[in-house]
Amino acid sequence: MNWKQQLQKPEMLLYVMAAAVPLSFASWRALINNFAVEQASFSGIEMGILQSLREVPGFLAFGVVFLLLLFREQTLATLSLIVLGIGTAATGFLPSVMGLYFTTVLMSVGFHYAETIQQSLSLQLIHKDHLPVVMGKQMAVGSFIGLFVFAAIYLFIEFFQFSYQTIYLLGGLTTVLMALYIYRAFPHFKGDAEQHKTLILRKNYWLYYLLTFLSGARRQIFVVFAGFLMVEKFNFSASEISILFLINGVLTIFVAPKIGRLVKVWGEKRALTFEYTGLIIIFTSYAFVDNVLFASMLYILDHVFFAMAIALKSYFKKIADPADFASTAGVAFSINHIAAVILPFALGFVWILSPSLVFLTGTGFAIFSLLLSQLVPRQPDQGFETILVRESS
């Protein structure tokens, strides 16, 4: 099969989108702490505000639905990637508090909307039997590009003395160029159903909504507090934390596709049960860990378990009306980010009293998720969203 024939496959569109996002986002994430402190004189207060502002567009991801009234979905994906790239490219040229707030929000709008549309297109264009495998490969592509960006930044800084402005500009413009390539190279793919252009909440999706919320809550505990534990309790340096990121990225490249195939073979219920059982053990261990090697292993395992989120998306693909995919992708992103707005602030006070209690809160979320996952049918389908439906009929 030649290259032009490959471009006729929707999987290739999704893989290229998965590569375009981290070119900007990994560049932004790798440099933002040093850039904010050195160039904009940030303190912890400004950095906290910056990270909160970064999460707001994720909470507002349901706005994608209304933009579909104006743009086709692939066109909106292109525009989102361009906004992501421009926000990243401009970051280095606005080294002030308000300048960084502005570019962060701009970058985040592009990032969250591109991620939302990528999830929607995955649900629409990939058959339910192949979705876990394709999503696993998307995660692997994103991790590989992220590692490439981190390595390139190291070389640019250590050997070529590139400025922050130059690196941000390169990362952002590369994403913009890839967005334009996507727009020109790929045909407009169509799913099985015309997508709803209104905000939709369906009561028969309640289990998916609730599991999505709990997933966002657990992820926030890991993102905010697991790394902080490594620094505060075990005195990890920035380079040692970077090594953990490197290990996580390499593992994701190899493990994510295998997890996708595992979900396909096991089914969603068994995969979710395995995920939540593992997370119960991980979060409880975080609460009491005293050994640095064991803590590092937990950090790596915790990240690997993120890939198991494929099972939840595969479950939704099987139970949903195909016309709901775009709307629900935006709603799900918003639900997932409710915790991002609330938990870091609230659990920050809990951390002062007891770091262990923060991670035991994560254990509680995981236990609740495990109990709810037992309501997932072994063969979910439209009209058979939970085992309660079959029992009541």
Image (cartoon, rainbow, N blue to C red):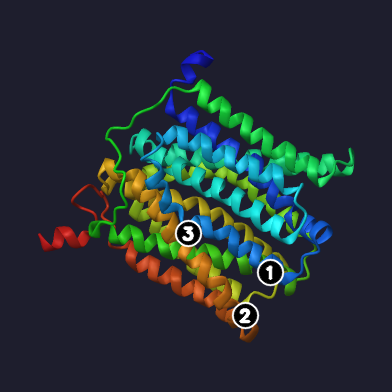
Outermost residue, top direction?
2
234 or 289: nearer the viewer:
234
Q: Which residue is mark 1?
A: 228
**Relative side of 264 to 379, left or right:** right
- The image quarter containing residue 100 is bottom right
- At x 90%, y 39%, the residue is 159
Dot 3: what SS?
helix
Cα–Cα span, label 2 and label 1: 10 Å
The residue at 53%/27% (across/down) is 182
Callouts 2 and 1 close, C-beta under 8 Å: yes
Whole-percent x, y for residue 145 in the image: 65, 38
Could you say whether the residue bearing mark 2 is in a helix, strand or loop?
A: helix
Three-letter amino acid code at the position of disc 2: Trp
Residue 243 appears left or right of 331: right
Along the line of sight, the residue nearer the viewer: 372 or 185: 185
Q: Could you classify mark 3 by the number of other residues whose Cα lies within 10 Å: few (under 14), some (14-19), or many (20 or more)?
A: many
Q: Amino acid at mark 3?
A: Phe
Horizontal placement of 261 versus 371: left or right?
right
Residue type marked 1: Phe
Return the x and y of residue 72 as percentages of the image width and height: 40, 34
Percent x, y of residue 201: 29, 57
Q: What x and y, as percent, mark residue 219?
A: 53, 62
Cα gap from disc 3 to disc 1, whole angstroms:
24 Å
Whether residue 16 is visible here, answered yes or no, is yes
Rendered image quadrant of residue 157: top right
Pointer 2 residue: 351
Q: CA distance from mark 3 to mark 2?
A: 24 Å
Q: Are marks 3 and 1 in contact (CB under 8 Å)?
A: no
